[in-house]
Image (cartoon, coloured by chain):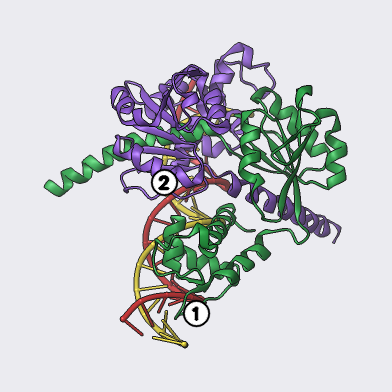
Chain colours: A purple, B green, C red, D yellow
Amino acid sequence: MFAACLVKRLSLYRRVLGALASPEGWAGGLGSSDGEYVFSHDLASLAGVSAAQVRRDVMTIGYTGSPRRGYDVAGLIGRIGEFLDAPGGQSAVLVGLGHLGKAVLAYVGGRRTGLRIVAGFDVDPAKCGRVIHGCRCHGMEALAEVIAEHGANVGLVAVPGAEAQNVSIQLVRAGVRGLLNFAPVRLQVPEYVFVEDVDITVSLESVAFFARHDAVRRQAMIKEAVR
Amino acid sequence: MFAACLVKRLSLYRRVLGALASPEGWAGGLGSSDGEYVFSHDLASLAGVSAAQVRRDVMTIGYTGSPRRGYDVAGLIGRIGEFLDAPGGQSAVLVGLGHLGKAVLAYVGGRRTGLRIVAGFDVDPAKCGRVIHGCRCHGMEALAEVIAEHGANVGLVAVPGAEAQNVSIQLVRAGVRGLLNFAPVRLQVPEYVFVEDVDITVSLESVAFFARHDAVRRQAMIKEAVR
DNA sequence: TGTTGTGAAAACCTTCACAGCG
DNA sequence: CGCTGTGAAGGTTTTCACAACA
């Protein structure tokens, strides 16, 4: 089994490499990359990991660079795509078109990675029939039909916590096998369904903790330097 | 140093325990908890981790249960609070009041954990002076002043990727020591600043990958069962 | 009996360090 | 020379398994 964090790093590498490759996104600020080739330590610093980690990850997906020039940017993007993406593309649906749902559509809408959000759903009839950020919106009653029609196997849950469990059951019943859950609840689903939680409250409390903790560590370091 | 994932699990445990303790949030569905006491395996299943993990975490923060009854819910909530929360409370500010920013305010607004989002900021003058979800909104020019006034040391970055780096520098300069970053960019900040990335694109691609991958694994398991 | 608390083991992930190469 | 590829080492996190206990 491939670890979840490897997959996430690869996804991140690809985005960073894409910015390197496209001229407009890249003002030539960092390291020795010219947009054609990149060294492990440059990619590492852009992705916020160590160079050894990058080399190990590249090795894991079976790509090879050259000691002289580093990695071929386009080639590595391609290899990551082969590893990450479904050969024939993949479809996702989004349930919940509140602020969060719209924000997600705006984020993901512009991307080109073989993964598309093909439909949105909401209990609010006022949102049905509209097209938001290029995504057609339906009432909840159309869920199973639309999912089957598109063969979507990924679902994004952006509804209030009280409804999340119920929504996730409907999604799984309709054929979804991966859930990205924004609700502050752990979903109880069959073990063949993969769930990733984006838990803002938890993340925020964690940041708050380490904002203080790192301050403590800084003072400890200062003390140690004085001694 | 305490690991980031321990902190996140504790934050999650606290939320789950809070739901257990409050009668309205708890219909008595799971396990043997009566709302007063909880066993490690019940808490584990609600939090989606193993019972051994729960016991280890509880041990790490120096709390003790009883073999007969399990953990005292209120007591454990209290102990987690001592561990996670700043003694005098902690203040955070949010930059970027688009859909995502508003969604975050709605999520976090209702919570009571010694951590408050005390102010919001946006470049759009139309949003200045308003109060959204109980949070006063200002123009970017007031950033340093408002942060100093509240002694905020946590910042949430919910602006487009192109502005995130610039915003994070302003926040750090104003005294922020922890950043929760929603922009699809790795922030370059001094090492005494803690950064947590909530990277929706990366999370989504990861879910898509494992939605397929688990399907493969399921078939492999079926094959093995047949053999 | 069924639970907690915990040393020990296992599993996992990251880094080190250096051979090999252009 | 400085880079990649990688075996080996190191570190961290999770689980096992069982003593102690009510």
Q: Amino acid at mark 1?
A: Ser
Of B96 and B36, which appears nearest the observer? B36
As helix, strand or loop, the secondary structure at mark 1 comes to loop
Whether residue A82 is situated above or below residue B151 in the rendered picture: above
Whether residue B170 is situated above or below residue A210 in the rendered picture: above
As helix, strand or loop, the secondary structure at mark 2 comes to helix
Q: Is residue B99 visible?
A: yes
Residue A92: image quadrant is top left
Of A75 and B155, which appears nearest the observer? B155
Same subunit, labels 2 and 1: the answer reads: no
Residue at left offset 68%, top offset 28%: B159
Residue at left offset 66%, top offset 45%: B109
The residue wearing badge 1 is B66
Q: Quadrant of the N terminus of chain B?
A: bottom right
Q: Position of residue A165 (x, y in %)?
A: 41, 46
**Circle 2 Cα neighbour tier, 10 Å, few/some/many (<14 / 14–19 / ≥20):** many
Asked whether, in this view, residue A2 is left or right of residue B24, the answer is left
Q: Position of residue B84 (x, y in %)?
A: 66, 59
Q: Disc 2 vs disc 1: which is toward the camera? A: 2
In the rendered structure, find residue A165 and report the number of the disc placed on it. 2
Give the letter of the chain under mark 2.
A
Asked whether, in this view, residue A201 is left or right of residue B155, the answer is left
Residue at left offset 50%, top offset 33%: B202
Give the letter of the chain under mark 1.
B
